Amino acid sequence: MRWVAWCVSALTLHSAVNARLLRTPQPRPLDRRTSVLLPVRDEAHRVEACLRSLLAQDDAGRIEVVVLDDGSTDGTAEVVRRVAGDDPRVVLLTGAPLAAGWLGKPHACQQLADAADPASEVLLFVDADVVLAPHAVAATVAALDGLDLVSPYPRQEAAGAARLVQPLLQWSRLTFLPLRLAERSARPSLSAANGQLLAVTRAAYDRAGGHAAVRTEVVEDVALLRAVKRSGGRGGVVDGTRLATTRMYDDWPALVEGYTKSLHTVPAAVPVLLCLLYVLPVLGRSRSARAAVLAGVLGRAVTARRTGGRVADGVAHPVSVAVLVALWVRSRVARHRGTATWKGRRL
């Protein structure tokens, strides 16, 4: 168990270094024409807050907002029309039927990119569950200096049982990936991105083949960054805690569906390693086992403090990891049986 304690301690130290080095985009006047692209499918309950935050952006005269209604059946388009009114910055499109060989979100994002103003130098994709601060677009575009793609990670809001799992997204990035090295590296394997808020230069997007290059990818955001890197670009994750907030899932069943959709893409070695490092030590009685548990909890606390999460929730870190592994198993089974779905579409 001693080697486990050493490994967990080293990873916790790495997360602390990452937390210190993680870049925070700074606001400045928007100096590039930007198309903000918003795919929506059955988002009537939350698209209003997102759209209003987009229309309240600083330097809003230099942006357009293109919304694509991807087959909604809950009145999403009506909400968009009501909020936008006669604002000329907003364009509402009706999505084309899903093409063969495409998954839903890449298909919607490609349509949005095709419809964006050709004069726009930056394409900024945002999800309907994201609410942006007034300076978010300008700061995100500014963060592209020297990079081709940048993905500010929003502050994650979670309630109830979701608090066990959602913070692991940020924890995993700060713990296992050298973020500053990754954003400058040409290696596609060193890639982290979050499609909730993602900006890419038009030139890099076209050079990489756009979302057409990742049309079958469930985790299309990371796949897009890898495509950008393969075509000679650079990019990665930065701190979006002060730029945007999001609540991805309203309840536990929605979270289970969301993770079932995507976790099967994670190699089996990852959940095995997580169990060895963060779950099994709870069962041990040695001093090394206790040290491993404490180091894991500390790593979770470091991440929470840096990203606006709940530091106290780190006490449940071993339980969080165990739940995540259980969701991975569920996702693998659903993928094998062909029963995985997302927003009414089979994957």
Image (cartoon, grey):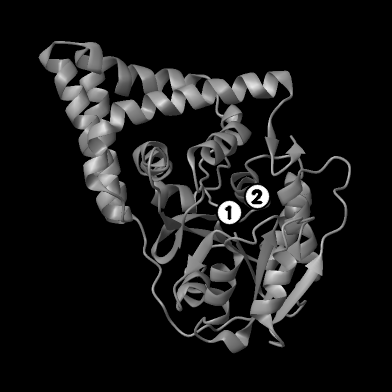
Which one is in front, 160 or 232? 160
Give the image location of residue 15, x and y in percent: 29, 42
Q: Residues within 10 Å of mark 1 (few under 14, many from 20)?
A: some
**In the visual, does 84 lie left or right of 275?**
right
Give the image location of residue 192, x and y in percent: 51, 46
Q: Any mark on residue 224, and which?
A: 2
Which one is in front, 172 or 183? 172
- Give, as a three-letter code, the residue at label 2: Leu
Q: Residue at x 49, y 19 (%)?
A: 269
Q: Residues within 10 Å of mark 2 (few under 14, many from 20)?
A: many
Looking at the rendering, in which quadrant would you find the C terminus?
Answer: top right
- Give, as a three-letter code, the residue at label 1: Gly
Q: Classify residue 275 by image quadrant.
A: top left
Q: Residue at x 40, y 52 (%)?
A: 180
Q: Any mark on residue 195, and which?
A: 1
The answer to whether residue 337 is visible is: yes
**In the visual, does 35 lie left or right of 129?**
right
Which one is in front, 246 or 144? 246
> In the figure, 327 relative to 219: above or below?
above
Camera-nearest label, 1 or 2? 1
Q: Please, what secondary structure does the residue beneath circle 1 have?
A: loop
**In the visual, does 273 lie left or right of 204?**
left
Give the image location of residue 106, x and y in percent: 73, 50
Using the numbered discs, state the Cα–Cα distance from disc 1 to disc 2 in whole angstroms: 9 Å
As drawn, which residue projects farthest toward the front?
74
Evaluate if marks 1 and 2 touch, with contact meaning CB atoms under 8 Å apart.
Answer: yes
Q: Classify residue 273 by image quadrant.
A: top left
Label whose residue precedes the other's in the sequence (1 or 2):
1
Give the image location of residue 187, x and y in percent: 55, 42
